[in-house]
Amino acid sequence: MKRIQGAAIVIWLVWVGYIVLFPNWQEAAEREKDYRKELGVHFVLKPPAPVAVPCYFVGCITAPASYFHVVIDRRDFYPGLICVTALMIVTLVVFRTGKNGSTPSIVGRRLNLVATSLITLTLPVPGNPYFPLGVLAGYMPIAMLHPDHDHISVLLGFPFFFGVYGAAAYLAIRLASWARTSMKSGR
């Protein structure tokens, strides 16, 4: 196993461990299935306590914390795990040793762009640490077939974030490649 493949597996293990051990928690009402309030990221064995919520009913000031229970937010949990696992498998396949024993390098132009795309798709969307950009890529066909108000953020957000993240990842890879070759040549 090469260093790139080993690094991909280590990064995948760290990412999945982080997602599983520190999930995003929500507060849910006992009798209302639609109500959810974000409680943030907490350790899986120490869930946060429910909190009182301002009430909007006539004569009600606050809904007590006892009215709520705490659950793990699974909306982004499984798509994030599937996306990161799929990208890790693609990385292992793309950077495998060739039949003649040659090892691919990200210094080459083609693999540099592949590595840039893989890194870009694993980066999280701002505001949600468990929503990699690759999940938005998976939602693109749905957004194109049903371009209503719910999918406009995907149609606009994915190309924007892919362009910005991709440019930053490409520059980082090129800078690292340049630094490595400079250090090897003794400059």
Image (tube, grey):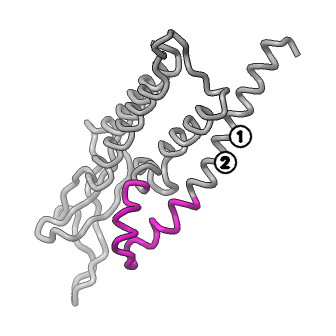
Above or below, 179 against 34 in this view is above
Residue 56 lies in magenta, yes or no?
no
Q: Is residue 19 above or below residue 11?
A: below
Residue 180 lies in what quarter of the image? top right
Determine the residue positioned at 38% across, 68% down. 143
| Residue for point 77% across, 19% down | 181
Question: Where's the C terminus, which quadrant?
Answer: top right
Name the residue tied to disc 1. 171
Residue 66: x percent and y percent? 17, 62
Q: In the image, what residue occupies the spot 52% across and 21% down?
A: 4
Q: Position of residue 156 (x, y in %)?
A: 52, 68
Badge 2 crowding class, 10 Å Cα cut-off, few under 14, some 14 to 19, many 20 or more, is: some
Residue 79 as seen in the image, left or right of residue 95? left
Q: Outermost residue toward the top?
A: 101
User: Which kind of residue does numbered mark 1 sit on?
Assistant: Leu
Q: CA distance from mark 2 to mark 1?
A: 6 Å
Q: Residues within 10 Å of mark 1 (few under 14, many from 20)?
A: few
Q: Please, what secondary structure does the residue beneath circle 2 have?
A: helix
Q: Quadrant of residue 150?
A: bottom left
Q: Is residue 174 above or below residue 124?
A: above
Q: Position of residue 41 (x, y in %)?
A: 38, 47
Labels 2 & 1 near each other (Cβ < 8 A): yes
Frontmost residue, 36 versus 177: 177
Q: Name the one closer to the observer, 15 or 94.
A: 94
**Which percent across, then down, holds residue 8?**
46, 26
| Magenta stretch bounds | 137-160
Picture mark count: 2
The residue wearing badge 2 is 167
Give left or right: position of 152 versus 169: left
